[in-house]
């Protein structure tokens, strides 16, 4: 109830009035003041009208009289009209309860008691529509009348449909504003596993084939696919008829398997069979994984045996040396017989689970190689090995992976023998017969020298002894008889020997050399024995084998020698000294004798015949002869040349100015600082020191000390020595199969040919300049150009001649036998020695003691053999 009076503690009446009016919420003139005690006044309202306050709900759906107070001090009460007027002023027009307003205002006025929270106006609420609901297509709502099919669904099949909430009627608030109608309540409903929802959220369809399970809040489809723990199989129950009476299809099942992760080994045929049934098919095996396939070993199946055992076992025994190849019995086969069949190794294959995981194998395949050897053919399948179709008969063999057929017949390279290999009959009784062997010989066109007795005996021995026989001669040719070589008989024994060295005189005694003979006119010097033709033979094929005729031995007269008409007898035409030159020439020469030295008392000598010098040939002098030159002393720094041989009892000592040259042989006790060349051989007794020695034949220095120290020694046909080099390491070059003079000539020719080519190029430039223009040249210029062209033609001819000479030199150089050339040392080869054979060089880096031979090895390099 509203307060109408207050007690103010204030002795001042006026101040008490103002304070009391303030507290009562009115003006001072609207209150009365009276004493209420010492220092206090009671301040009261007078003629206070009744009051009310209207409250409106925030949602504008109701209005209340919050407080309705009665009048005070004879004030005016609140009437219903006052309240209705206030409602109208607030534009509240709907739901006003006028009757209640009249009742309340009358009661407050009558009772003098205030009223509170009186609802005097109320709006009309909106009413909700029907709530949402779910209509199922399964279970009791299923179209199928089969109980087992009531809950079965497939991909795309509708399981449930949601009926959305309905819209209700609209309302109105107390101000007359229309309110939106309300929807019915939405029932929560969700799609569980394997269920799809339409975009409007109203239709629920199956994603896979399975059994639908519904509840108030959700629906799901149970997956019927059961995958084994090892993922190697998948099973499922197949219900052909669905809840909506449709039939399950193969595509539906495959889609369900894919959704379940089953992607491999699907049994579509089993699924189709189950779908064709009318009743449920329990635990159908719908997919199987593929286990990994381990690799296998290749296998060879043989169509024959060896030693009556498996060929592979025999091959292993052969490799281990446990069996002799010649003692292995082999079976007889013929053309196109199958020898072996290869079963290839199976490849390792990875497996796969029904859900697609790879299963890796661990054992790789193991191949077994087999090679088609001699007389074996591989068929088109690449696995079958047969006897070649041109084989009449042969023996099957397998060794170390190679399959072959041995021909019983072997023909020698010279075609003079046919050899038979025969094995005892095999377990089936198959073996070579005389008839087969004769056919083999005919097939090979062997016509001559067939030994039938050997064929018969070989068959008998192989059968009775049970062992193979090898290389039995069953055909034999007749070899030709070679003719005897021609020869020369010398009644006077003119063939060369090296001579005898006498230590007491320190000289070589040529009297014991047997090379120079004193003859009388008409004396027979030599008899030539002609070569014989020989007797022809034949091989086993009947081919004639011409006999090799003997090689004629040539002998040519070299001055003062007569030859008989038949060319077989050689006779001296004069009295003189007979000598043999280069082993193929014989001559009789007058002997010119110098009792002492060749010096200023004799001057230089040039003789047509033999020359016998008892003393020395001194430095600076020249001696030449068409026959042998015999020197009883020695040769100093002189020039000595012979068209035959040079024989020096002492030594050849020079200061590298003189030169000794013979077309035949050179023989001396020692050589020091000299230059020697022989077209034949060179024989030195003791030493060659710091000299340049060459020969187109052989060099021998081994009968005495036999030492080569320093300098260069070259012998095309080889060298024999006791020692080469020295302990002091003096550079010593020894050569064999190397013609330095010929190489030098070739180099000189090359330089001259290059000079000619350069000169021709310059001439060509000049000739081109003057002859390319069709202009008439002045007479003097034309003459010079003509001379230049002629000179160029001469150069061309000269170059052609030089090239021919060069080709001949190169051919001669290439004909040198480097393969058999050798340098033989009996005692020692010292460091510092350089060995050259055929242009290949070997430097001796440490002393070699004992016999040693230097030759070219198979790689063409100089090698030492001890």
Image (cartoon, rainbow, N blue to C red):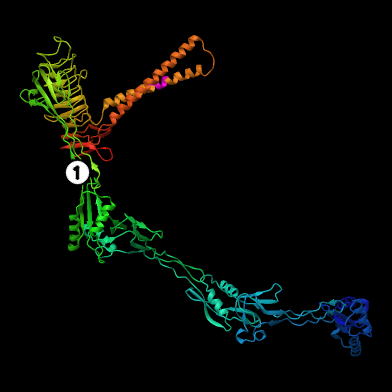
Identify whether 639 is placed above or below 238: above
Prevalent SS, magenta region? helix
Residue 490 relative to residue 480: left or right = left
Q: Secondary structure at mark 1?
A: loop
Residue 473 relative to residue 72: left or right = left
- Looking at the image, which residue is at 28% across and 57% down? 394
Residue 612: give x, y in percent of width and height. Answer: 11, 17
- Looking at the image, which residue is at 38% across and 61% down? 383
Magenta-highlighted residues = 755-759
Identify whether 706 is placed above or below 54: above
Residue 332: give x, y in percent of width and height. Answer: 27, 61
Identify whether 14 is placed above or below 334: below
The quadrant in which the N terminus is found is: bottom right
Q: Which residue is mark 1?
A: 479
Residue 821: give x, y in percent of width and height. Answer: 22, 34
Residue 773 relative to residue 327: left or right = right
The quadrant in which the C terminus is found is: top left
């Amino acid at each position: 109830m509203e307060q109408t009076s207050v007690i103010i503690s204030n002795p001042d009446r006026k101040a008490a009035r103002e304070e009391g009016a303030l507290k009562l919420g009115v003006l001072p003139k609207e209150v009365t003041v009276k004493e209420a005690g010492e220092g206090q006044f009671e301040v009261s309202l007078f003629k206070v009208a009744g009051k009310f306050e209207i409250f409106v709900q925030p949602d504008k759906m109701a209005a209340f009289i919050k407080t309705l107070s009665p009048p005070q001090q004879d004030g005016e009460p609140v009437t219903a009209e006052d309240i209705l007027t206030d409602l109208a002023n607030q534009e509240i027009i709907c739901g006003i309860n006028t009757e209640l307003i009249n009742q309340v205002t009358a009661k407050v006025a009558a009772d003098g008691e205030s009223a509170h929270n009186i609802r005097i106006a109320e709006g009309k609420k909106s009413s909700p529509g029907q709530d949402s609901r779910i209509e199922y297509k399964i279970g009791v709502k299923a179209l199928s009348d089969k109980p087992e099919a009531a809950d079965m669904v497939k991909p795309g099949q509708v399981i449930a449909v949601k009926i959305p909430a309905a819209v209700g009627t609209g309302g109105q608030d107390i101000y007359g504003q229309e309110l939106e109608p309300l929807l019915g309540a939405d029932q929560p409903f969700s799609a569980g596993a394997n269920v799809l929802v339409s975009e409007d959220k109203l239709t629920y369809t199956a994603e896979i084939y399975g059994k639908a399970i519904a509840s108030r809040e959700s629906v799901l489809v149970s997956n019927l696919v059961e995958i084994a723990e090892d993922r190697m199989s998948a099973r499922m129950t197949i219900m052909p008829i669905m809840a909506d009476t449709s039939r399950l299809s193969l595509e539906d099942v495959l889609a369900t398997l894919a959704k379940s992760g089953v992607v491999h080994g699907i049994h579509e045929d089993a699924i189709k069979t189950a779908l064709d049934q009318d009743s449920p098919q329990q635990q159908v095996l719908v997919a199987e994984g593929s286990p990994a396939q381990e690799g296998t070993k290749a296998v060879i199946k043989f169509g024959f045996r060896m030693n009556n055992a498996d060929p592979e076992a025999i091959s292993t025994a052969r490799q281990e040396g446990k069996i002799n190849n010649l003692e292995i019995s082999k079976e007889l086969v013929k053309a196109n017989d199958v020898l072996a069949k290869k079963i290839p190794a199976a490849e390792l294959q990875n497996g796969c689970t029904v859900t697609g995981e790879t299963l890796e194998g661990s054992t790789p395949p193991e191949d077994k190689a087999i090679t088609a050897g001699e007389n074996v053919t591989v068929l088109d399948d690449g696995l079958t090995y047969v006897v070649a179709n041109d084989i009449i008969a042969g023996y099957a063999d397998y060794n170390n992976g190679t399959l072959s057929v041995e021909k019983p017949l072997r023909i020698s390279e010279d075609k003079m023998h046919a050899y038979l290999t025969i094995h005892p009959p095999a377990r089936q009784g198959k073996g070579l017969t005389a008839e087969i062997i004769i056919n083999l010989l005919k097939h090979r066109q062997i016509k001559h020298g067939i030994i039938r007795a050997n064929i018969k005996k070989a068959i008998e021995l192989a059968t009775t002894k049970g062992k193979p026989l090898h290389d039995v001669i069953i055909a034999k040719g007749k070899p030709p008889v070679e003719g005897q070589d021609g020869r020369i008989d010398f009644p006077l024994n003119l063939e060369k020997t090296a001579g005898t060295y006498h230590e007491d005189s320190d000289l070589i005694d040529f009297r014991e050399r047997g090379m120079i003979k004193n003859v009388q006119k008409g004396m027979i010097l030599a008899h030539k024995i002609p070569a014989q033709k020989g007797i022809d033979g034949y091989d086993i094929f009947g081919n004639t084998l011409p006999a090799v005729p003997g090689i004629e031995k040539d002998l040519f007269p070299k001055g003062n020698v007569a030859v008989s008409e038949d060319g077989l007898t050689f006779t001296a035409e004069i009295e003189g000294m007979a000598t043999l030159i280069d082993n193929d020439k014989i001559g009789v020469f007058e002997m010119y004798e110098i009792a002492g030295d060749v010096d200023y008392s004799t001057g230089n000598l040039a003789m047509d015949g033999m020359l016998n010098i008892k003393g020395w040939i001194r430095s600076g002098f020249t001696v030449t002869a068409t026959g042998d030159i015999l020197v009883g002393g020695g040769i100093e720094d002189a020039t000595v040349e012979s068209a035959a041989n040079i024989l020096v009892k002492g030594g050849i000592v020079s200061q590298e100015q003189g030169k000794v040259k013979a077309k035949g042989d050179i023989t001396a006790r020692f050589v020091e600082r000299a230059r020697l060349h022989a077209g034949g051989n060179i024989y030195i007794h003791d030493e060659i020191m710091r000299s340049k020695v060459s020969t187109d034949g052989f060099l021998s220095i081994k009968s005495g000390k036999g030492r080569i120290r320093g300098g260069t020694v070259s012998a095309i046909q080889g060298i024999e020595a006791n020692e080469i080099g020295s302990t002091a390491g003096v550079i010593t070059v020894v050569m064999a199969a190397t013609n330095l003079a010929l190489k030098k000539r070739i180099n000189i020719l090359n330089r001259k040919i290059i000079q000619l080519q350069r000169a021709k190029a310059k001439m060509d430039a000049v000739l081109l300049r003057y002859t390319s223009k069709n202009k008439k040249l002045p007479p003097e210029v034309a003459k010079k150009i003509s001379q230049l062209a002629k000179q160029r033609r001469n150069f061309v001819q000269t170059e052609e001649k030089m090239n021919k000479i060069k080709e001949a030199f190169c051919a001669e150089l290439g004909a040198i036998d480097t393969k058999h050339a050798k340098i033989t040392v009996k005692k020692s080869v010292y460091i510092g020695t350089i060995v050259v054979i055929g242009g290949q060089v070997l430097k001796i880096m440490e002393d070699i003691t004992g016999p040693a031979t230097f030759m070219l090895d198979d790689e063409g390099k100089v090698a030492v053999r001890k």
